[in-house]
Amino acid sequence: MTPNSIKYKSAHIAKELKIPFNFHSLRHTHATMLLENGAKPKEIQERLGHSRISTTLATYSHVTQKIKTNMVDIFERIQQND
């Protein structure tokens, strides 16, 4: 399977389902899901093939409610350990 075949197939599916998305948006979703579930930014950067971590963090990773909740949980655990 090639990137072009994935792009073609995702465009075909989007048209059939009448849902506006493209292959590239799947990369954003993929990166965000990995981040939500504990993957390290450097690992995500390498997986997506970005030369700069700033591209991965600023463009492809999105802060979701799950990430916000996890961050609060981390902070609460830190406070309990003090």
Image (cartoon, helix red, strand yellow):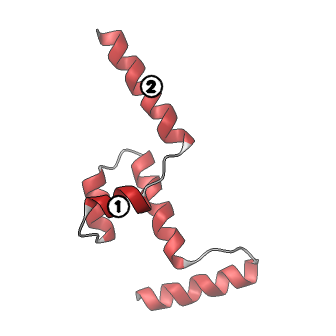
From what the image shows, is residue 27 above or below residue 14? above
* Quadrant location of the C terminus in the rendered image: top left
Foreground: 9 or 51? 51
Regarding mark 1 in the picture, which secondary structure is present there? helix
Left or right relative to 11: residue 51: left
* Quadrant location of the N terminus in the rendered image: bottom left
Residue linked to disc 2: 73
From what the image shows, is residue 11 above or below residue 41? below
Q: Position of residue 11 (x, y in %)?
A: 61, 85
Q: Residue at x 27, y 57 (%)?
A: 43
Q: Position of residue 44 (x, y in %)?
A: 32, 59
Disc sitting over residue 56 in the figure = 1
Q: Position of residue 54 (x, y in %)?
A: 30, 59
Regarding mark 2 in the picture, which secondary structure is present there? helix
Q: Residue at x 46, y 26 (%)?
A: 72
From what the image shows, is residue 14 above or below residue 55? below
